[in-house]
Image: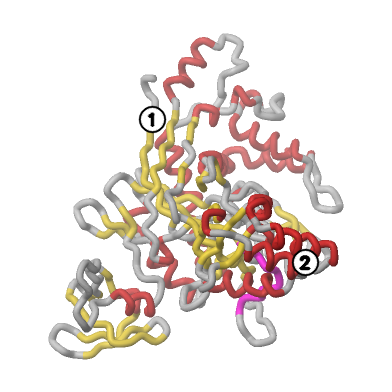
Amino acid sequence: MRGDVTWRFTAWPLTPIHVGDGSVLAAEAWRLSGDGAWLERFDPAAVLRAADPKRRTDYLQALDRGDLQNAQRLLRGAVRPELVLERIAVGAAAAAALRPVIENWLRRGDVRPFVRTGARPYLPGSSLKGALRTALLSSLVPEKKAAIEAAKERHRRKPNGPIASRASNEVQALLLARPESERELRQIVPDQDPFRFVEVADVLLPEAATRVDQVINWRPGRQIKDGKQPAEKMQMIFEVTGSAALGARLPLACEIRIEAGLSREVRRLDRSGRKTPSFPLDATALARAVNAFHWRLWDYELERFYAGEAAIEKPLRRLIRVKAPDGKELGPAELRVREDVLLLRVGRFGQFESKSLEGVREGWNAQAKPPHPMARGNTRNLVKPGGTEPLLPLGWLLLLPEGFEPVVAPASVAAGAREKAPTGGASPGAAPARRAFLDGEPVTVLRGEGSEVTVRLPDGDIETVDESELEWR
């Protein structure tokens, strides 16, 4: 209808993202390929039906004896290639954590899969819509701070931590209601919620767009016995998207529709006001609120959790670079002021701060002694890819206009060295190698140590520079 706004973006996962449905892929439903690079998922019942009678008998006898390790070995050995439902890439750290499961049935080996529709992973539109809603509500908090504090006081926290859900309902109603109705309105009726006029389509992921990685808990300053960060007491294995941070180019079509015209038509026809939102959505205001909220979270997390941790901080800062259709490179300063570029934090491990209202949020630290409320989290969950790849936070998604794309830099010096021009002849039909450039001039990468790279300049001079100064084409 007239006045409707449709945003069409290309969504780029900057860091790994996980959205699950609560299901678990147990150890008896997967196996690792011989080289450990792939997780092969199968249906145990189908494998048993297709197995030869002797193997089925041996499997059932092993179960009767309680020999679960041998039972799982027999089951995995019966998986024929045509019975493999899906092969998912596995990060080095996840593979190292999963291998012992095969030899020790006492280890659970649970893998948390990505949510799927029709056997295909997808980013639910509801996850993106929730990120938009939280940002907009946060932008409205300063205007009604006193009323919100009064609502929180009416719903005091219980001794064990929880706050009644009606407190959240009342806060949302206060933010989206007309000022004159604040005293009467205690919750938003679904028909009166302006976000019912916002549609965000589900985003289907292409084939081979996910990988299985280990997730660890990170707390600045925490040390374990060998002096290394982070402490990894729990085995957490999740299926996550590929990401620009690990060199993956994963453009996803994303559409957001704001039905402003339909909202106005409902307002005109609804004489009783029961189905009319009190708060009209404005596309420009929504975009500004989204970016203000999520860019603040990005800055806060970099400073609070990763400042001084060069192996984490530098790769993250390199992510915020975008190439425009005219070839111009845009950095953080240019991207933050554009209303056709959105930064979102979505999915699981998006952290407490991204899913609660700024200036209102109040969590509960149950592990503290004594337990107490908290306005910000003390830890972060990071993907640990393994090898030379950096630890990465989860959930950062950049929405760009058509023709714009992130400048995907190598995740490490080692990755950069693998992609430099070969010294020998390329094999016939090989893809052209990428080259390193410094200040627009081609250079040869000689070696790298930490974040420093030694390069040979066009005039033959040797120079050591920070890896972030290189551009790969």
Magenta region: 229-237
Label 1: how many Cα within 10 Å (few below 14, some 14–19, many 20+): some
* Residue underneath mark 2: 68
x and y percent of residue 158 in the render? Answer: 84, 48
231 within the magenta span? yes
x and y percent of residue 387 in the render? Answer: 49, 77
Horizontally, residue 445 falls left or right of residue 13, namely left
Asked if residue 316 can be seen in this view, the reply is yes
Q: Which mark is residue 413?
A: none
Asked if residue 304 can be seen in this view, the reply is no
Q: Nearer the viewer, residue 423 or 181?
A: 423
Q: Amino acid at mark 2?
A: Leu
Horizontally, residue 269 falls left or right of residue 274, namely left
* Residue underneath mark 1: 5
Horizontally, residue 280 falls left or right of residue 174, namely left
Q: Is residue 321 above or below residue 420?
A: above
Horizontally, residue 240 falls left or right of residue 97, namely left
The residue at 45%/48% (across/down) is 205
Dominant SS type (magenta): loop
